[in-house]
Amino acid sequence: MTVRAVSRSGLYCDAECGSLPHPGDVTFPNGAAAEAAGYRACLRCRPRLCGGALHLDNAPSPVGAALNLIKEGFLHRQPEERLAVRVGCSRQHLRRLMIRHVGASPTQIARYRQAHFARQLINETSLDVHTVARAVGLTDQHQLDQLTINTWGQPISDLRAGRASLTPTGSIELLVRYIQPYSFRQLLRHLTPRATPGIEEVTDGSYRRITNQGGNARILEVRDAHDGQHLRVQVHSSSYDNLIDDMERLRTLFATDEDPGPAVAHLSDDRLVGQLVAQQPWLRVPRCWDPFEASVRIIVGQQISVAAATTIAGRIAHTLGQRVPNGASLDRIFPSAGDLAEADLNGLGFTHQRKTTLRHFGGAVADGSLDLRMSGTIEEVALRWCALPGIGPWTAQMAAMRILQHNDAMPSSDLGIRRSASRLDGNPISSQELDDRGARWRPFRSWAAQHLWDSSHLIGGTA
């Protein structure tokens, strides 16, 4: 989402805000780029509206990988040099790539995220300033004041509109703005049969998930705010440290920052999927909360039903995952890659081949030979994944779609997709035929695939 800036005032804001005294005479691809150029954010726009998501077009894989790691809080703990090493280039080269494709350096992007989330916490909660600083990945109020002075010209306390601050002992509520049109119901419909018991659940129109931050259990509950603009998130926790990273994972899972408009425009006239797109122009491609957890779920789901995969994922969580004794139904943390690689997988419902695949996969992630944050072209992703034993094209395409957020993945061998396509066409469609037809859907094959998966509730199927 582009932002407009007024060179005379040195301010920028979203085009929908309307608060700037003069029409913007400079545009930037996002708020981070505007701030990197020396502009200050408008104080009237809702937090995170200025700039929106950091969209990339044809950027090299180090850029996408760096953004994924920044969103996970990598630069809270490590310098830019370590980020560059992680994505396979020098610091100078990574900065050049990021400025060229995003408009800001890695550190500027990280500080942009922290400043705007801090402002949201100040505006929407009664958290004290020290807690807000730790929630955005900083250590103290001094660091946070420096950040907000650079962004808005004011210390953080001046941004709170006369409300007292305190450290709550129960929960806080935050609003998450989404790009319209949007259907929370569609995301819940996708997540309901796939929720891993003990880790996540969908009940009474809400999604709930447990996570762990520094040994402190945290439960996030997501509902529709019913205002046509936001999701409402309730955070139950005794500590709000690094909450920014959990909120980013949530935004990724629910695809709140993804614009369906380009996919709708490209697919709406297609003979096979055009009608589906017209019926659900709000549809999103659900992504994932955690790359490793989602990867294991995809591998477990090879050639079995969604229900069976959910059952087995629950067994993994309960048998191998860390237990969080909290007296609630959500009391498990998914095992790490290293734990899975060394685990006894007998009795969990796996074939010998699947156990071998999971151990090799866990080992490859644990030792870094497979980096789940490294993106690239669909072909590059497939090559990396399919080099592992037991990983085929379907798994690689699903990983590209769900984990690496590719818009052009196509798991054409998926039985559910082919069943839906065959019903719509009136004739059986093979994987090869679906690949051939899918050539017209590029570069939005992930969106077309999701429409086909989601069509079962529209046309009475079971895909």
Image (cartoon, rainbow, N blue to C red):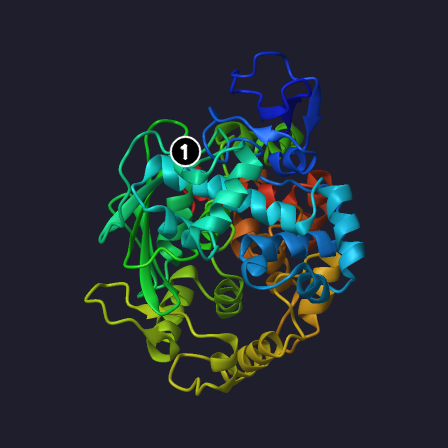
Q: Quadrant of residue 36?
A: top right
Direction top: furthest residue: 22
Label 1 sits on a secondary structure element that is helix
170 or 195: nearer the eye? 170
- Locate the N terminus and report the quarter of the image it occupies: top right
Relative to 262, does residue 59 appear above or below in the rendering?
below
In the displayed structure image, the side of residue 259 where residue 339 appears, left or right? left
Point 75% across, 47% down: residue: 59
Q: Residues within 10 Å of mark 1 (few under 14, many from 20)?
A: few
165 or 326: nearer the eye? 165
* Place of residue 250 in the rendered image (x, y in percent of width and height, measured from the top left): 44, 49
Report how many numbered discs are placed on residues in the image. 1
* Place of residue 401 in the rendered image (x, y in percent of width and height, measured from the top left): 59, 53
* Place of residue 137 in the rendered image (x, y in percent of width and height, measured from the top left): 48, 55
Relative to 298, does residue 288 appear above or below in the rendering?
above
Point 59% across, 74% down: residue: 365
* Place of residue 231 in the rendered image (x, y in percent of width and height, measured from the top left): 37, 38
> Is residue 282 visible from the viewing direction of this image?
yes
Relative to 206, does residue 153 appear above or below in the rendering?
above
Direction front: furthest residue: 142
Point 67% across, 17% down: residue: 8
35 or 346: nearer the eye? 35
- Give amino acid for label 1: Asp
> Is residue 404 visible from the viewing direction of this image?
no
Point 37% across, 58% down: residue: 195
In the displayed structure image, the side of residue 172 where residue 365 appears, left or right? right
Identify the residue position indicated by label 1 in the image: 158
